[in-house]
Image (cartoon, grey):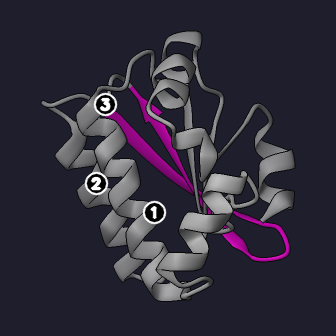
Amino acid sequence: MDIKVTTEQGRVPVTILHIKGEIDSATYQTFQSAAEKLIADGARYLLVNLQDAPYISSAGLRALHNLFNKLRAIHKDVNDDELRLRMKAGTYKSPYLKVANLSPQVKDAFELSGFETYIEAVDDINKAVASF
């Protein structure tokens, strides 16, 4: 797996992780560590471009969830009770973490795992950057 990082300026600076290759049990730590380093270095809005990632395992999804939690702890947008209520009602999407360009297989895994209830999946990088 290769990770290329770029930054685009929307209303806020958006750090984009372009993933090439699968995020699975052998690579998820590399992905998570790279993203956590970006957060430690000041990135506050992450877009994970999965256009060249044909597969994501449960370990990769867990890494995404961990990034969601790290960014949520920094921004403190809603408390845990409100988050649960809004997720259940379908009214919460992370304003700090989004994914883009999911392959059909990755989209299935993302949706079957319930991630679409709190992480927005988009098909256009420019629109995604503008939506932060």
Mark 1 neighbour density, 10 Å: few (under 14) some (14–19) many (20 or more): some
Magenta region: which residues?
1-20
- For label 2, the residue is 32
Pointers 2 and 1 in contact (CB under 8 A)?
no
Which secondary structure type mostly characterizes the magenta part of the structure? strand
Q: Earlier in the sequence, mark 1 or mark 3?
A: 3
The amino acid type, in three-letter code, at marker 2 is Gln
Q: Secondary structure at mark 3?
A: loop
The answer to whether residue 17 shows anywhere in this view is yes
Residue 44 in view: no
Q: Secondary structure at mark 2?
A: helix
Q: Is residue 83 left or right of residue 89?
A: left
Mark number, residue 68:
1
Q: Name the residue rendered at 23%, 28% in the picture.
A: 24
Report the residue at 59% width, 11% height from top. Answer: 104
In the drawing, does residue 110 fall left or right of residue 34? right
- Disc 1 to disc 3, C-alpha distance: 16 Å
Q: Which residue is mark 3?
A: 23
